[in-house]
Amino acid sequence: MTDLDALESHLRKAVRGEVGFDVTSRALTTMDASNYRRVPLGVVAPRDADDVAAVLGVCREHGVPVVARGGGTSIAGQATGTGVVLDFTRHMNRLVSLDPEAGTAVVQPGLVLDRLQDAAAPHGLRFGPDPSTHSRCTLGGMIGNNSCGSHSVAWGTTADSVRELSVVTARGERLRAGQGWAGAPEGLRELVEGELSRLRTGFPELPRRISGYALDALLPEHGTDVARSLCGSEGTLGVLTEAVVGLVRAPRARALAVLAYADESAAAEAAAGLLPLGPLTVEGMAVDLVASAAELPRGAAWLFVETGGGTEAEARARADAIVRAADVVDALVVTDPAGQRALWRIREDASGTATRMPDGSEAWPGWEDCAVPPARLGAYLRDFRGLLGAHGLRGTPYGHFGDGCIHVRIDFDLLTQAGVARFRSFSEELAELVVSHGGSLSGEHGDGQARAELLPRMYGAELVGLFERAKAVWDPDDLLNPGMLVRPAPLDTNLRFSVLPRKPVDVVFGYPTDGGDFSAAVRRCVGVAKCRTTAVSGASVMCPSFRATGEEEHSTRGRARLLHEMLAGELVTDGWRSEEVHDALDLCLSCKGCRSDCPVGVDMATYKAEFLHHHYEGRRRPAAHYSMGWLPVWLRWVSRLRAGAVVNAFAAVRPFAWAAKRVGGIAAERAIPRVATETFSRWWGRREPVGGSGALVILWPDTFTEHLSPSVGRAAVSVLEAAGLRVAQPPTLRMRVRPVGDGTSKAVSLLSMRRSRVCCGLTYVSTGQLDRARTVMRRTLDLMAPVLESGAPVVVLEPSCAAALRTDLPELLHDDPRAARLASRILTFAEALERLAPDWTPPRLDRPAAGQTHCHQHAVLGDAADRRLRLAAGLPGELAGGCCGLAGNFGFEKGHYEVSAACAEEQLLPAVREAADGTVVLADGFSCRTQLEQVAGVRGRHVAEVLAEGLEQAEGKRGE
């Protein structure tokens, strides 16, 4: 029995890096991207090789195993363990050097692949292998798994790019592995030289043979390459501390040919025939994995074939040659880099999309990447489909068709005993099928626990016995990642789902895409870890808090892991009251970016609201939940008392402002926004009615437009009416009591009516006050009853409120059909103009635009109509991605200012600072405008304000 206190104390004394034996540190590393879960004793983030050696020494003394972990995206279970986990992403994540002349780089194991690519690109170089997780996988993990990626037909596997490896053995020996037996531990050469015949005949010849140990790399004819033999060893032989890797010359220009076929078998059979033409990629996928095939040529399956050249014309010519040589249904050749990136995103997101079947049911890894000789791929796929059918299973293959490597997620039932038994029997039969086609059980991601048990079927008992002897030479104490590759745990044990509750958890949201099951919602996170991407690309948002802190617990995946452990109840034992889960969720901005950017649709904003609801149930909440969660109430009272000027005056006096912020739980760095002295509705009530013959629209008076920025509402009315639309406000009268009979009776006395105002409930949702949110939403539905009967669309100017009405409303009131009806009527300002006034031409402003697409707009509403409106109005320029960082109440809450400002500095503020003079700064969200004003001193405007100003200028010119 391990003395945990003694182990932790010993480690803290021995290493300079962080040592974490707390619940959060352990919970974050119980899983990788596989089906497996193991609870570690602790986590160490070493600072250097000395720390690594020290950890190994302490763990050897205490008899505790060690697991090296990179990005945690392994899908066979090899990045999990029950001992001490080494996290290299915290400190040992540097590019040590890059030699453009030699075409090599020296890297630490925690370096993310994209950071190496960024450094190599200015020299016309790149690292050849590029898995779809390139934005978050680490070089150490790639070496441990011998990762490949889409360009392996041109540049091979990671092993083909490794020159030297610095490793520390389990017994503390530091070796520099390379060719000619360099860095070989004592006894390895003798072992190999005694088994030359077996090593020459026991390994199948195919480009994607990743399974087992690469002991054949130690043959004389292969240069007795010790470094190469370590690739794919999954951290079981030594711990990598540094690597010298080779870089390849990147083509100056590329073209992407997308070849369409009638089905996946046709695409698979065509793939091998394209290899003699020298493509850089031959990737395949079928229509099942494509959310929308609008950007793809017509067909039911596609090959993504990339070509390179010294010029665009040369790359295009090679792509055209491939199209001519291929027997296709249709084809598309793209040379524009942005267009190519958009198409590649479709393929890269398949790793997440595949985790759900078309009907929404779950699918899992386990047989994710078998590989066969490319010429046999078509036949193998047919047999594979037959085996799936025989077991009553479904899966959608995709992957590296040019290398004969197939990725697939299968709808295994891993929650019941019968389902797990079928998982085992299918695995055993599939292993036999792969071997019968001359293939490898793993063609990219390694064996781990998922396949190691079945390696004797591929290699035979004697060669597997040789693997065990090699492991004993490197690691005689079996300290490093035990249970992987040799003497493995059974493939149907340690399944991560076995600890989850079998009965649905009592929750408030409806979770419509997860069958109302909160456990199923949490299971969505399979560890793909797109949320750990360290740089925003394009308009993406997820995950701003992780990019601000760099901490796993502040990533979407980290939070999902903690929620998983909360449901499991083994590590996190106090359920909804857990402070560990609360602390991880505290820095979630509720930006909803994961709802759209996560390939599997994790919706952490909803999970956070659900958690806060239960966490504070029956308890006093933080002051900010009352000051900002109840903001609509406080502002309504200010309006009724006509106290706006008084509030503003007090807020301008430092002692009063300090006291108000302290009492309200508001960050001291923040200024209290000014309240409008005339609300939007009051202005609406005194204006002269404007007639019109166009469509009727209901303009939603959200809290922010009503009380804080009524100028946006006034501008929107001006533009909508200029477009010929008739604008009305929502009703303000509702019944005090429920109607009688069927609810349609009109015989209601005036005494049973009361004035009220509609509200989307956003502030209550974001602070987890879900009972209050449901009450407010039901009141709103009562008020909107006449509108729902009329069929009139509802225009919402504030993106966060529009998103709440589209998603939170129907998901919280899933038992009220009116909620879905109202949600379907919600239009953004741009959508209303485009759909209801298609012939209207906005004023030409001819000024560049900068700013940021609201995160809720990006995640829930979409901004296609907004882009078209800006283009029609002469407002060119791409708006930044990411999140402004204020995010409603988040950036105002005490303790959040630093992260809030860091999020703004990532995309929004640089985009505004770099904008040319005369640029229009667009920010449709009140939070975005407030952040710009308070952090950068810049005034942002809603697009309605900009268009209204353009109309006034045009009218002025006509009047001259």
Image: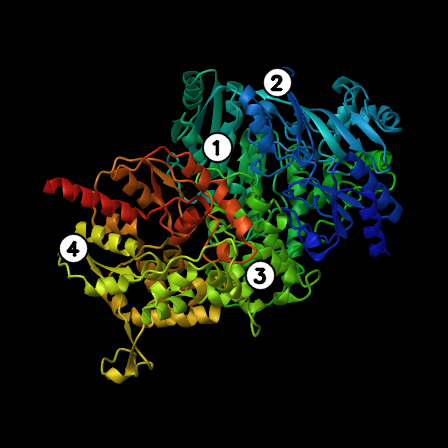
Residue underneath mark 3:
519
Residues marked 2 and 3 touching at CB (< 8 Å): no
Q: Which residue is mark 4?
A: 694
Which quadrant of the structure image shows residue 462? top right
Residue 267's label in the rendered image is 1
Q: N-terminal of the two: label 4 or label 2?
A: 2
Q: Is residue 330 above or below residue 686?
A: above
**Which kind of residue does numbered mark 3 sit on?**
Ser
Give the distance between the C-alpha atoms of the residues marked 3 and 1, in whole angstroms: 37 Å
List x then y, in percent, for residue 489.
76, 49
| Residue 638 seen in the figure | yes
Residues at circles 4 and 3 in contact by the CB criterion of under 8 Å: no
Q: Indicate whether 886 appears above or below 178.
A: below
Circle 4: is it few (<14), some (14-19), or many (20+) Cα within 10 Å? Answer: some
Indicate which disc, 4 or 3, sits on the residue closer to the N terminus. 3
Looking at the picture, which amino acid does disc 2 mark?
Answer: Pro
Residue 76: percent from left, percent from top: 67, 44
Residue positioned 62% across, 67% down in the render = 577
Secondary structure under badge 4?
loop
